[in-house]
Amino acid sequence: MTPYAGGMPEAPSRPVLNLSGERLRQAMASLIKVSEPVGGIERFAAAVKLRGEIIRGRLASAGRVELSDLVEIVRLMPTVRRKIGSLIEAAGWTTVRAAIAELLAGATEPGAANRRISEFDARLAGGRSAPRFVRDLAAEILHGVYPETYPLMTRWVWDAKTNT
């Protein structure tokens, strides 16, 4: 961060999301149209709500979450589900469970998302660089438990390289 003329630091650079009202209307109309044959947009909304309820239910007490609970919820996380086994094997279940508990402890604290996710990555990386799916796991957990506080921040949703 560099100070501007008034002496206050500039905000760190952030991705820019250019939204057009017309583009959003077109995207929504397209989504509604293609969803009609399979039950409509309401069905998708209900599925998203159910997914969140499952994740919150399994992680209600993160410090006591069982491995079987995590295995069940990662099935709902496409960028994580095939890789979680290697993480648990490398870090150990106790470490993974503790990292989840730390991630969720005080997660509603404003402005803490980047720090919490970085700490989660570091804890599970064991001194190495964490695989990208570890960040996705943290983002999925935060969004699943606190959907109104944390948007879904996984690579398949927000990827600066592909401008999504």
Image (cartoon, rainbow, N blue to C red):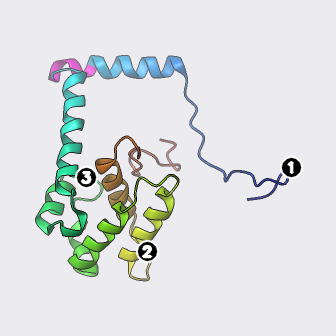
Residue located beneath label 1 in the image: 6
Residues shaded magenta: 34-38
Q: Residues within 10 Å of mark 2 (few under 14, many from 20)?
A: some
Residue located beneath label 3 in the image: 77
Above or below for 30 versus 10: above
Identify the residue at horizontal 36%, vertical 64% (top origin): 103
Badge 3 marks a residue whose secondary structure is loop
Identify the residue at horizontal 40%, vertical 63% (top origin): 132
Residue located beneath label 2 in the image: 122
Distance from label 2 to label 3 (Cα)? 21 Å
Residue type highlighted by circle 3: Met
Q: Which image quadrant: the N terminus?
A: bottom right
- Left or right of residue 65, residue 118 in this image: right
- Left or right of residue 14, residue 141 in this image: left
Q: Residue furthest bottom?
A: 127
Residue type highlighted by circle 2: Ala
